Amino acid sequence: MKVNEIFYSLQGEGYHAGTAAVFVRLSGCNLQCPFCDTQHESGSEMTEDEIVAEVAKYPARLVVVTGGEPSLQLTRGFVNALHDVDKMVAVETNGTRRLPGNVDWITLSPKDAYLGDKAKPVLNYVDEIKVVFDGEHEPSMYPGIMCTHARFLQPCDTGDPVRNAEIVNAAIEYIKKDPRWKLSLQIHKILNIR
């Protein structure tokens, strides 16, 4: 597998925000989002056993497999190997490709509002939906996707503090009008941690 990085921190977004987690960032993505804030293209080839050995060094049970787009490389065998060292496997995906059925937690972050049909999710069941909100595109509730826990609006980080404040305020107002949504802030950025 081509791995961009493995690091230990707190989950900064969504349902598990504030939870200690080992992050396995896989290289590559099948989409080109204009607001992507992750440098994920570079990386080193590692075997699944090498990745699991690195992950096992950390005490947290939660492992977040992210990218780029992890579904390009994620396998059932790799998920099983993480389970064998008593890890819970969460995947953050754009949802355009199927995932192995043994993943413990699926965070769908759809991008079709920005990229059209080529980014349309194909998943039917997820644990949480986390929509990047820019204050301009109407967020879809994705009624055809069963979501077991929560639907989050996550304000887009533009790099401009003034614009970011406008987007956060717009997200708050949107949620007040439609309380089916919850707010997800990128607390790792607020706290200046990885």
Image: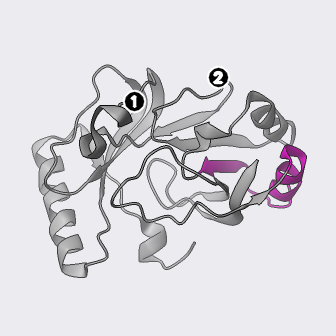
| Amino acid type at image mark 1 | Pro
Range of residues picked out in magenta: 47-66
State the residue at coordinates (27%, 37%): 116
Q: Is residue 185 magenta?
A: no
Q: Nearer the viewer, mark 1 or mark 2?
A: 1
Alpha carbon distance from label 1 to label 2: 16 Å
Which mark is first along the chain, 2 or 1?
2
Q: Is residue 45 above or below residue 30?
A: below
Depth order, front residue of 57/100: 100
Quarter the C terminus occupies: bottom right
State the residue at coordinates (55%, 26%): 98
Residue 121 is marked as: 1
Find residue 34 and report its horizontal and vertical position in percent: 33, 59
State the residue at coordinates (84%, 44%): 48
Q: Is residue 48 magenta?
A: yes
SS label for mark 1: loop
Horizontally, residue 57 falls left or right of residue 166, namely: right
Find residue 5 and report its horizontal and vertical position in percent: 69, 63
- Quadrant hosting residue 185: bottom left
Which residue is denoted by mark 2 in the rendering?
Answer: 101
Depth order, front residue of 4/90: 4
Horizontally, residue 155 falls left or right of residue 136, namely: right
Labels 1 & 2 near each other (Cβ < 8 A): no
Find residue 145 and report its horizontal and vertical position in percent: 37, 23
**Colouring of the image:** one colour
SS label for mark 2: loop
Q: Is residue 45 above or below residue 108?
A: below
